[in-house]
Image (cartoon, helix red, strand yellow):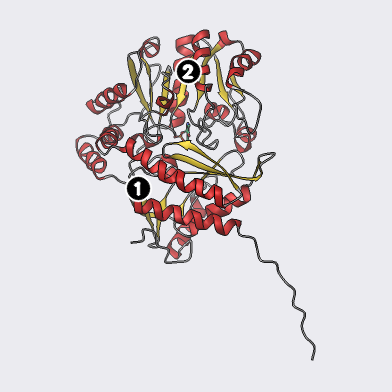
Amino acid sequence: MKHTLIKTELPGPKSRELTERRTTCVASPMDSLAPFYIKHGQGAVIEDVDGNRFLDFTGGWGCLVTGYSPEKVVEAIKTQSESFLHSDFTVIPYEPWIELSEMLAKKAKGKSEKAVAFFNSGAEAVENAVKIARGATKRRSIVVFEGAFHGRTVLTMTMTQRPMPYKYVFGTAPDVHRLPYPNPRKNKYSPKDFERLLLETVCPEDVAAVIIEPIQGEGGFNVPPEGFLEEIRRVTAKYGILMVADEVQSGYGRTGKFFAIENWGIEPDLITLGKSIAAGLPLSAVIGDKKYFDSLPKSSIGSTFGGNPLACAAAIEVIRMIDGDKLLERALNIGKTIRRSFEGFRQKYPSVKDVRGIGAMLAIEFIKDEEIWSPDTETCQKVIQDARDNGVILAGAGLNKNVIRLLLPLVITDEQLAEGLGIIDKAIENATKKQPMKVKVKKMEN
Ligand SMILES: Cc1ncc(COP(=O)(O)O)c(C=O)c1O
């Protein structure tokens, strides 16, 4: 059985109607990847308002490791909604917040006793990790890396490396320093350069935190070279700096471990979580050594809707699903299938030059000239468009938009995965096919 179905031109008539309405009232900078509108989603499949069916390999930008509308999560939200929708934990506290904190604190491995705080978005979690680090260390500076993405508030946008439109249009926050990210293809830095670069850039006695994504998400699924995270851990500990792992995108099972940082056996001081934590409900978290939270004044962190009871109820079921349905194992199995397929693309298509990632968090990079590692943005974008027209929604990544990354729901079936990978294969074939030479035929005179 085919899971994808394209039965109208894209976008279909109902989607076009919605786009017309949208242009009259929706703030225009709020853009969408898909030109069609969702009506229904289940697992890894969505149906649009015109009855077309797609496999969503973006998982709502990585928010759906447990898929669209998992039954148990929906049930838990319904049950919670019948008791109360909101009270604000900082006014009248409730059990789901405590239960979820207990579950997450247990998941976070390491020597230190853990505490958890909830917020709404990934950016808010990162901002609060900065607040906690500044409060605990009484220092100001924050160190981030090339290719990083940490959010779109003024502080997190400054921490993000995407000059246009972010910094040029909106300005920057102070005390953020960016260091190179060692990448043998793009620069000559090695993990051992980290301490020297840090000392050349900022006074370590003023650094509150070094924040790093264990695997860069928007930056193009860049996996740190061997020894880099370990070196950051060593150097941060040496100078009393907090190491923060931003796992908003890489966490929650995608790499085959609950926390991506577990792949390196490192215990960071703080971890930020978001996206998949509550199956698509807005929820984010900061988890870390309890002593850092305890060093802050009462009520110094918080947010009106952060840790909303519906989101907490959903998030409790998400963790039960990850454990009960063995989604970490599933991530590794899916990852093997995807990697095999991606390696096949690399053999077949000269512009696919790199396959990278861990577990099911995998990407391919399109390159024009391997010598200078020049991005093939055009081919990459053509593949994304062709795949979408044929039923697979894909997310691009990388500063040059020349990477395709998979953020698919881990509940995807083997048949759905095979169908989706087949559509991507065909899309690359179409995008890289040599155009037949146009031969001018001279009209015969008679
Ligand atoms: C690593 C990382 N941190 C933070 C964020 C910001 O999350 P949000 O968009 O929920 O604010 C993102 C979003 O893509 C992310 O990938």
Residue under label 1: 412
**Looking at numbered disc 1 in the image, what kind of residue is underneath it?**
Ile
- Split into 4 quadrants, where in the image is the N terminus? bottom left
Which residue lies at the image location 41% right of the left edge and 42% below the top edge?
336
Q: Is mark 1 within 8 Å of ligand 1?
A: no
Quadrant in which the C terminus appears: bottom right
Q: Which residue is mark 2?
A: 243
The response on whether ligand 1 sits within 8 Å of label 2 is: no
Q: How far across and how far down the image is residue 181, in percent? A: 59, 26
Q: Is residue 119 left or right of residue 350?
A: left
Q: Residue 95 or 248: which is nearer the viewer?
A: 248
- State which tag comes first along the sequence, 1 or 2: 2
| Image x and y of residue 222, in percent | 53, 33
Q: Is residue 280 visible?
A: no
Which label sits on residue 96? none
- Give 177 or 172, whichever is nearer the viewer: 177
| Residue 111 versus residue 3 in the image, above or below | above
Q: Point out residue 140 in the picture as x, y percentages from the top left corner.
A: 54, 14
> Above or below — where is 274 with respect to 211?
below
Residue 144 image point, x, y percent? 56, 23
Amino acid type, callout 2: Met
Q: Secondary structure at mark 2?
A: strand
Q: Nearer the viewer, residue 4 or 90?
A: 4
Circle 1 or circle 2, nearest the eye: 1
